[in-house]
Structure formats: structure tokens, C-alpha cells
Image: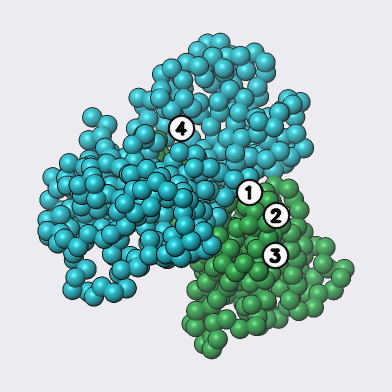
Chain colours: A green, B cyan
């Protein structure tokens, strides 16, 4: 089956440059310092942030800046096929990648000798899992009041023959590549770029450009959510 | 652009995003000329006298009276903003860069999401949730996490575990003497991992480590059998009802500033509002027993235990709705929940929590 129909639409009715529906929420839990939930189409991810707090293992302690740790896991029924091991080598690699992205965004020198833990759980996976994880963790960090240089926003893109497509689903990424771009939207700088499967070098530019455009759109949704959250909470809090 | 007048003297223009800076990160832009600065200072002074907080929150709507003071209870009294921006020409001295902001290419940018506070030229951004920052003289409640050489490590909800030295506590019996080798050996008998202590912040070290002290009579160990306290390990389920005390953790930003931290509430409970967001509730005890290292095994009546449970749930519901926590607000919520005839367990339901919180805010505004 074609990824793009002769009418120029994708299987879920989107145009090639259209994002899936995004919704997010801040502050789901009491116990972690920050928590968030994001839904991009059928991809659903939960994130919780603990810290900055005392370093758990002293050998890792860095007296100049904070340690950032990330642990990602998937629930058994998150994909079509049952996940046997919620934490395999691939999720460990992804955890490292997510932690690496936040090394660029968190103002680490503000928290010398401390540790920030990010826990991400994938509830449902339908393409763009890494980017959803990064978006959810960014929101959770904002909710926790951790000092950041900027939002971190991530989006995926792919190419079908010669048409670049934005925000690919699982089905669409099977036939092509999946490029994940994470960026600081207000600085316009890309902090991580990941390409699964092969992509011709000549096509890289337009795919990355499209993903960056998608990032800006996702950023608008995320900042809107943060603002409404603050307004809701602050209205009551102003009562002294 | 939403320009608004400030006492007919000058204008502060607030724009939703700046065109010169493509980043939408900058939500609010203040075009501050010298003239405006002068009048802003005057407003700040005016606000200082009018309110107790002494904060000028920028971006407040004119009708809301700059957001603090008597209109404080109204919804949307002041709007939180991501960021404030200054014209690149204005030179900032280091002390003008407040908390929660950083400088980039001469522009002050917020690094946390919260409300922007401006006092004269100092701009700070305060997030809603934050770990405890620490201030000398604060009374805090903490839990011992580690026993080390000559000192205990205490979890006080800050970014590093605080330090309580053996020489900084009052020895049992209240005697004043130098700590001997025996004292050092018996440290675990005084306080061990999991014990709760009520202490004072004595000093903040250069690296941000808090140093604690419990030198006076009112500080010291607080008995905690519901937690993982030392004695709790030996106590079976049946005799857990002997003491009823509980620790509630809320965001430190919700704790109202207060000189006195320990309150004997009229409902028959003693509450310690730790500045770090840990609130500890016990039955009222005679003053002389307050800071011994011995756990009291007298049986606590059911009514008192119910009171404590209700207080705990009231604290949780206030925190859930981001209402400042002070003896007044806790007692109001407590009385409201009794007036509305809710059972203690009902207070855990979300809709009941909302009802009680709204009713409490209303009766506080009266």
C-alpha cells in the first residue's frame, strides 16, 4: 500500500506536512518533583522527574555540575507485539540519548553535586517514540522548576520517494527512514539528530528542515499548555 | 500590544512576542525608558506600602491593582509570564540578574516557568514548584538518611542532603559539654536512619550545602512511628496506634512565611510547618517532652487520631489546589470540612477536595 495516496493524502488523512493531534498535561503526580504526559496521535508517554537531589552513588558525583540520569521503559502492551523485556538494550540506548539531549538544555552548573532523574514510560508506541519521550521529559522538567536554557522540543520526519513527510507513524516508518530532530526552539539550535534506516544525503536537508518546522509547531502547543497550567495554579496561589 | 496606564504618568508597553527576536520564548517585553523606570520605582514604593509582600508583579492588569494586596483573592490577579526582556542597551550589574533568569547577548531570559517579580530593577522568576532553597534561621523538618563520622545527613527536600553535626545538637538531658568519643560512638542511639528531626538552618555553605543545628530546647527528634523510624522496626501493627503522628510533604513555595513554625492548633494537634515543605502533625504534648530522644508510648485516643487524619487530608487538599499553607488556612479548611460534614476518608475524593478548598478560600476572603 502506498504511503501517500494519488490524492496526496496519507493513510490517516493527513497531508505530508501535517502533524498528528497533540495533547499534553502537566502535574499528574504528587510524589515526583515534576511529571507530565504527552499524546502525539497514538503515541502516549508519561514522564516523571525527581530532583535535583542528593547523588545516589558517590562515584558519579560531580562537584561542578549535576548528574542527569534517564530511565526509559515500555509497558508490555505498548506495541502490536507483546514486549518481553520492558528494559532491553534498545531502551537503554534511548535512555542515554534522552539524557544526552538534556545535558544540552539543563543549566547544570546551577546544581553542583546533585542528581536529576528522569523516568519515562511508554504507554503506547506508534512512531516517534523518542521524540514523544523527549517532549514529555521537557515538560516534566519545567513542571519540576528545574532551570533550563530553553524548552526542548523533538519531532520526526521521513521521506517517501521525493516527498518529505512529517511526524511519521509506525506504519509509515517501516517503509522509509525516521529522522528524529530535537532542538531548542527559541535558539533555533539542534541538540540531537538521529536517523533510523537509510536516507540519501541529498535529501537530508529538506527532511531536517521539515522536522524543525514541526518542532516549532509542537513547541507552540507545549508552551500553551505550560501557560494555562501556570495561570490555573497561580490564580489560586495569589491568595496569601 | 496592550498598553496600560500607570497612574497617568507613563506607559509600560507589553507585547506578546518580540519581532526583533524570533524566539517566542520571550513572551513579555518591557520597553523601559528612564522616565518609565522612575515611575515604576514610584509604583513599587506605592505597592510596598500597600501590601505586606512588597513585591511588584509585572504585567498585572490595571484593574487588578497590580496583583497583590486586597484583590489578591481574585482569579487572574496577576499573570505568570515566562520571561521578561530588557532592551539590550541597559547594562545590568550582577545583582540585578535575579533568580530564575540568565543573560544571553544582553537580554535577560527566564529559565523557569513561573511568575515574574520585579522589585525596582531586580527581576526574578519564581517557579510554582521548586526544591527547598534554604535560608539561615528557617525551621525545617527533615529525615535522617545517613549516619557518618561526627555528623548526620538529613533529607530536607533540598538539592543536597543537609548536614547535622554532633556538636550542633543538644545532648540528652540538656547538659552543655564537649562531645566525647562515647557520644560519637552512640550517635546511632540518638538518631538513626529514618528518624525525623525538627531543626534550624544555621549556615549555608559555599557549595549550597545546608548546615543544621538543634541547640535549643524546642528542636530535636520528633517521634515518628508511622514512618520508618528506628523504633518502628520493632513495633508491630497492634501497638502502632500508641502514637499517631504523620508527615506531609508539600511544595516549599506553598508554605506561608511565619516567624513561628510550631503551632498548637485549637483542634488538639501540634503542627510543625517546616519551611522546606515538610509538615509534621502530632498530638499536643507537654512542652518539657517536646525534644527528648525518647518516644512517648502513651495511648492516643481515637478522636485525636481522627483529628490528625483530618488535618493531614486538609493539608493535602490545600496543596493540591495550590493554596498557601498557614495555620489559618489549615484551620479554615479543617473547620469547613467539619461544617460540611465530610468524613475523614471522604476528603481523599477529588470532588470533595475541590468543594472544601473552594469553601475554605471563600471563608478566608470574608
Disc nearest the viewer among 1 and 4: 1
How far separated are the C-alphas under marks 4 and 2?
37 Å
Q: Give the alpha-carbon distance from disc 2 to disc 1, as whole Å.
A: 9 Å
Report helix, strand or loop for mark 1. Answer: loop
Nearest to the eye among marks 4 and 3: give it. Answer: 3
Q: What is the CA distance from the residue labelled 4 to the residue labelled 3?
A: 37 Å
Tell me the distance, in whole angstroms, between the alpha carbons under discs 1 and 4.
34 Å
Residue in view at x 55 percent, y 54 percent: B159
The dot on residue B78 is: 4
* Distance between the alpha carbons at the discs numbered 1 and 3: 25 Å
Q: Position of residue B103 (x, y in %)?
A: 71, 38
Residue that protrudes farthest toward the right in the picture? A202
Marks 1, 3: nearer the viewer: 1
- Discs 4, 2: same chain: no
Element at badge 4? loop
Establish if B11 lies above or below B156. above
Q: Are marks 2 and 3 on the same chain?
A: yes
Q: Measured from the top left, where is residue B180 in percent x and y?
A: 47, 57
Q: Quadrant of residue B149?
A: bottom right
Q: Which is in the foreground here, disc 2 or disc 1?
A: 1
Category of crowding for the residue at label 1, using alpha-carbon neighbours closer than 10 angstroms: few (below 14), some (14–19), many (at least 20): few
Q: In the rendered structure, are the residues bearing label 4 and label 2 in contact, judged by CB atoms less than 8 Å apart?
A: no
Which of pointers 2 and 3 lies earlier in the amino acid sequence? 2
Viewer-proximal residue among A191 and A220:
A191
Residue B229 percent coordinates (x, y): 34, 66
Dot 2 corresponds to which residue? A64
Which residue carries the number 3 mark?
A100
Give me the residue at 42% from left, 31% from top. Answer: B77
Amino acid at each position: 500500500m502506498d504511503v501517500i495516496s494519488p490524492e496526496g493524502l496519507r493513510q490517516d488523512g493527513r497531508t505530508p506536512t501535517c502533524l498528528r493531534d497533540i495533547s499534553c498535561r502537566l502535574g499528574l503526580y504528587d510524589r515526583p518533583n515534576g511529571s507530565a504526559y504527552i499524546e502525539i496521535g497514538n503515541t502516549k508517554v508519561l514522564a516523571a522527574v525527581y530532583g535535583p537531589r542528593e547523588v545516589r552513588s558517590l562515584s558519579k558525583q560531580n562537584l561542578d555540575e549535576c548528574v542527569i540520569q534517564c530511565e526509559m521503559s515500555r509497558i508490555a502492551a505498548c506495541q502490536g507485539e507483546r514486549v518481553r523485556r520492558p528494559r532491553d538494550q534498545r531502551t537503554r540506548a534511548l535512555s542515554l540519548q534522552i539524557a544526552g539531549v538534556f545535558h544540552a538544555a539543563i543549566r547544570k552548573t546551577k546544581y553542583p553535586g546533585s542528581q536529576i532523574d528522569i523516568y519515562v514510560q511508554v504507554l503506547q508506541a506508534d512512531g516517534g517514540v523518542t521524540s514523544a519521550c523527549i517532549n514529555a521529559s521537557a515538560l516534566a522538567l519545567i513542571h519540576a522548576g528545574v532551570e533550563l536554557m530553553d524548552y526542548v522540543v523533538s519531532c520526526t520526519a521521513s521521506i517517501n520517494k521525493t516527498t518529505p513527510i512529517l511526524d511519521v507513524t509506525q506504519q509509515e516508518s517501516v517503509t522509509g527512514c525516521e529522522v528524529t530532530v530535537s532542538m531548542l526552539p527559541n535558539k533555533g539550535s539542534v541538540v540531537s539528530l538521529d536517523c533510523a534506516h537509510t536516507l540519501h544525503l541529498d535529501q537530508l536537508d529538506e527532511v531536517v528542515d521539515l522536522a524543525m518546522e514541526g518542532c516549532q509547531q509542537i513547541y507552540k502547543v507545549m508552551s500553551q499548555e505550560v501557560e494555562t497550567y501556570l495561570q490555573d495554579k497561580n490564580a489560586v496561589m495569589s491568595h496569601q | 500590544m496592550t498598553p496600560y496606564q500607570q497612574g497617568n504618568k507613563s506607559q509600560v508597553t507589553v507585547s506578546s512576542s518580540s519581532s526583533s527576536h524570533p524566539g517566542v520564548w520571550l513572551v513579555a517585553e518591557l520597553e523601559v525608558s528612564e522616565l518609565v523606570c522612575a515611575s515604576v520605582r514610584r509604583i513599587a514604593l506605592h505597592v510596598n506600602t500597600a501590601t505586606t509582600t512588597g513585591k511588584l508583579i509585572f504585567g498585572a492588569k490595571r484593574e487588578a491593582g497590580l496583583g497583590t494586596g486586597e484583590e489578591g483573592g481574585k482569579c487572574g490577579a496577576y499573570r505568570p509570564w515566562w520571561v521578561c526582556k530588557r532592551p539590550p542597551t541597559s547594562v545590568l550589574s550582577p545583582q540585578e540578574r535575579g533568580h530564575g533568569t540568565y543573560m544571553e547577548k544582553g537580554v535577560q531570559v527566564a529559565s523557569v516557568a513561573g511568575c515574574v517579580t520585579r522589585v525596582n530593577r531586580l527581576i526574578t522568576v519564581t517557579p510554582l514548584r521548586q526544591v527547598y532553597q534554604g535560608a539561615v534561621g528557617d525551621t525545617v523538618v527533615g529525615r535522617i538518611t545517613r549516619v557518618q563520622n561526627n555528623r548526620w545527613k538529613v533529607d530536607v527536600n533540598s538539592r543536597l542532603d543537609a548536614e547535622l553535626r554532633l556538636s550542633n545538637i543538644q545532648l540528652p538531658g540538656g547538659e552543655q559539654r564537649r562531645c566525647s568519643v562515647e557520644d560519637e560512638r552512640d550517635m546511632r542511639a540518638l538518631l538513626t536512619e529514618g528518624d525525623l528531626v525538627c531543626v534550624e538552618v544555621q549556615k549555608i555553605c559555599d557549595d549550597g550545602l545546608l548546615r543544621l543545628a538543634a541547640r535549643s530546647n524546642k528542636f530535636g527528634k520528633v517521634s515518628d512511628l508511622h514512618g520508618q523510624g528506628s523504633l518502628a522496626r520493632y513495633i508491630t501493627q497492634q501497638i502502632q496506634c500508641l502514637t499517631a503522628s504523620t508527615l506531609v510533604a508539600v511544595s516549599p513555595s506553598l508554605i506561608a512565611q511565619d516567624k513561628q513554625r510550631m503551632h498548637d492548633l485549637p483542634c488538639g494537634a501540634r503542627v510543625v510547618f517546616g519551611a522546606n515543605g515538610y509538615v509534621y502533625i502530632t498530638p499536643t504534648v507537654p512542652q518539657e517532652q517536646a525534644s527528648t530522644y525518647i518516644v512517648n508510648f502513651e495511648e492516643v485516643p481515637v478522636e485525636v487520631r481522627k483529628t490528625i487524619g483530618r488535618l493531614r487530608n486538609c493539608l493535602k487538599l490545600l496543596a493540591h489546589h495550590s493554596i498557601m499553607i498557614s495555620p489559618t488556612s489549615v484551620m479554615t479548611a479543617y473547620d469547613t470540612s467539619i461544617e460540611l460534614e465530610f468524613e475523614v476518608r471522604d476528603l481523599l475524593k477529588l470532588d470533595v477536595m475541590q468543594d472544601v478548598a473552594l469553601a475554605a478560600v471563600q471563608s478566608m476572603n470574608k
